[in-house]
Image (tube, rainbow, N blue to C red):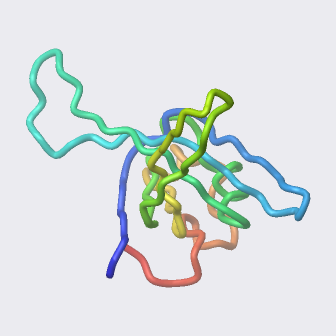
Amino acid sequence: MLNSVVLVGRAGADPEIKYFESGRAKTTFNIAVDRPTKRVEGQDNTDWFRIELWGKPAEIAAEYVKKGKLVGIVGRLEFNRWTDAQGAKHEMPVISANELRLLGSKNENSGGGGNWGGNRTDDGGGF
């Protein structure tokens, strides 16, 4: 079986990073992805996806992804499930990313680059 998602879109806000007692980092942010359909006047053809990164990729995303920046994501679809204080069950789809690429011009992603290949947080492969 295969659970693979590839997205290219713009960050809707700066990422939020959280560090756990173990020292591991988790970063989350939303990206807007335009649908490949003709736009109709007054209609929005954009889908929003919640992105989640862990470890070193999370730290890189927190530093280099900014609102409006174009990013590429490779990951898998997961569902966060929880029950609230009133006993209602909730479910939220999340893209658990294992690869992040900063796209666009160098000026658009100023400060990016470094020793991690400019755009990737994985150790090989690509899209």
- Compared across the picture, whether 74 is left or right of 22 comes to left
In the current view of this chain or complex, which residue is farthest to the right? 21
**Which quarter shows the N terminus?**
bottom left
In the current view of this chain or complex, which residue is farthest to the front? 87
- Residue in the image at 47% along x and 59% along y: 78
- Residue in the image at 42% along x and 77% along y: 126
**Location of residue 123 by image quarter:** bottom right
**Location of residue 25 by image quarter:** bottom right
- Compared across the picture, whether 23 is left or right of 11 comes to right
- Residue in the image at 81% along x and 63% along y: 24
Residue 6, image x and y in percent?
35, 63
In the current view of this chain or complex, which residue is farthest to the top? 42
In the image, residue 21 sits, relative to residue 67, either above or below, namely: below
Residue 10, image x and y in percent?
43, 41
**Which quarter shows the C terminus?**
bottom left
In the image, residue 48 sits, relative to residue 120, either above or below, namely: above
Q: How many marks?
A: 0
**Location of residue 119 by image quarter:** bottom right
Nearest the viewer among 52 and 118 is: 52
- Compared across the picture, whether 84 is left or right of 72 comes to right
Nearest the viewer among 74 and 111 is: 74
Residue 14, image x and y in percent?
62, 37
- Residue in the image at 65% along x and 72% along y: 116
